Image (spheres, rainbow, N blue to C red):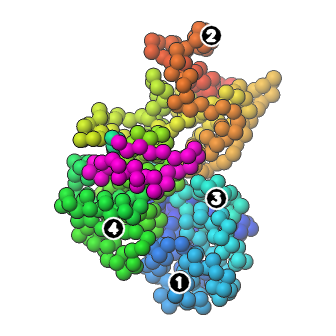
Amino acid sequence: MILRDYQTEAIAAIEAAWSAGVRSPAVVLPTGSGKTVIFSEMVRRASDKRLLILAHRQELISQTMEKLCAIGVPRYDIGIVRSQNDQCRSRIIIAGTQTLMSEYRRRRIGAVDRIIVDECHHYSAPKWREVIEHFDAFRVGFTATMSREDKLKLGDIWNKVVYSKDIYWMIEHGHLVPPHGITIDVEGLRLSAPAGADYTDRAISAAMRSSKAVETVVKTWHNECSGKSTILFAPSIEMAVEFADGFEKSGIKTGVITGSTKDDERRSIYRKFDSGEITVLSSCMVLTEGFDSPTATVAIIARPTKSRALYIQMVGRVLRLHPGKSSALVIDIAGAGDGKSLTLEAVIPTPQEPGMPTGPQGPRGAGDPASPIDLDNATFRRVDFMSDRPSVWKKTHDGELFISTGKNFVFIVADPNGYTVGRTFSDRSMWGRIDGKRIAPERFASGIPLDFAVSMAEEIASASGVLSQRLTPWRGRTPSDRQRAFAASMGVQIVPGMTAGDVSDAIDIIKASAIIDKKARKRE
């Protein structure tokens, strides 16, 4: 098996980290980039070592076994430790994490030289952490998203991200297909959740049942992507079945996968989906990790979420390369709720088109959405590969991304290995001077994926001052005479229709451009 250049680079980075004494390095690569291929090659090369591979889903265990055998690792060298399987004396062990939460099962394995952890963002949770810390060995973690919604600190378990590529890099270099999206606004679908919490499966299911979500999704699918291989993510088993019934009644062969689906039945459904015998796969949060079907070209996000990590995992299921596949379609479901539900336009910005022009209601996502189209009790709007975040992101004249806290600017700039996140010490100091002294910016991270950089920058900005939100009431008000006068002194041309938010953004762009843009630095 021939590895891609970045896969070879990732292995080299891990081995270099171990040689330098970093006991727990991590690798962050998006879904579809071949993380299993990377660590399978590491296993093949380590023919003199005893290895433990941890995975928490049957799909991940099966996928790992297949990749190891495909890459040339002898089957007799590999053992499974999960549930009733207890091949604990094998040189290479693929173990279920839940099984190893039993100290007895861990002791039976004995000593290992290296631990490879799939979906490693889970392992800061106490019980999960206990599993890997039982073994006195160097380890490496792989994940598509080094973030958790419960705010547990991943840095306590993973020392350093030693290699990462983001989804934009993968698409730009032809390793993933680009997504485009449709957001369906379903009349009567009302979503609500406590502040800071994600929607519950029960609440989403109840809201969908009281609306025409199933009928609307099925009709949209027939109008926009009929016949295309589709994965649907439902909030509950009941809704997965209801969506499947809706597609079946419209003449589309559909399979249902839930956590209770038996292994043999699951494998049969997967084979039928890959062969095209089944067109739509309706799932209840089972396919977010470990599922690999490159033929899938459409993702229906019928499980609205405020979790970026979960959303990215769902979308990533349809971005893998496949002959004849040039793009993927993401269908989001939205309603008249609190406006917090994520969509493709909010989660996956592109560096070339960050999408932050201002308007009467503040910055909106870039792209060219079509006029809403009536579809019974729903409309949908087309979205591009763009951003529409609640925070007010702006661009300098040279296109560098930044947000203002009122005290300083938090910025994102490209670096050779990804993106750097930094903060000025005041709105006058980055590579500029204060009282004759040159002030350098404070840098928080370098070489990280863009989506992580955006999230990190927003957290830093929130802690630094007041982070302006797109829908903050003052942004829509008429500019005051004082604001107009100050803007005029900065060279801002105020035109009819500009709001206080528009004027404030224009001022920030002038100030930020003077201290962030490379051209400004060269002129000093």
- What is the quadrant of residue 123 in the picture? bottom right
Q: Residue at x 49, y 42 (%)?
A: 340
Vertical placement of residue 306 versus 99, above or below: above
Q: Residue at x 59, y 34 (%)?
A: 402
Which tag is nearer the camera, tag 3 or tag 2? 2
Quarter holding the N terminus is: bottom left
Measure the alpha-carbon separation of dots 3 and 1: 32 Å
- What is the quadrant of residue 148 in the picture? bottom right
- First-in-chain label (4 vs 1): 1
- First-in-chain label (4 vs 2): 4
Q: With 252 as the anchor, is 484 left or right in this view?
A: right
* Segment colored magenta: 188-217
Is residue 427 visible in the rendered image? The answer is: yes
| Residue kind at label 4, given as amino acid type | Val
| Residue kind at label 3, given as amino acid type | Val
Check residue 161 in the rendering and tell me which mark sits there, or answer none: 3
Vertical placement of residue 461 versus 509, above or below: below
Which tag is nearer the camera, tag 4 or tag 3? 4
Q: What residue is shown with label 4?
A: 256
Q: Which residue is drawn at 44% across and 35% down?
A: 365
Which tag is nearer the camera, tag 1 or tag 2? 1
Is residue 387 visible in the rendered image? The answer is: no
Q: What residue is shown with label 1?
A: 83
Is residue 4 in the magenta section? no
Measure the alpha-carbon separation of dots 3 and 2: 47 Å
Q: What residue is shown with label 2?
A: 482
Measure the alpha-carbon separation of dots 1 and 2: 70 Å
In the image, residue 277 lies at what x, y percent? 23, 69
| Residue kind at label 1, given as amino acid type | Ser
Measure the alpha-carbon separation of dots 4 and 1: 24 Å
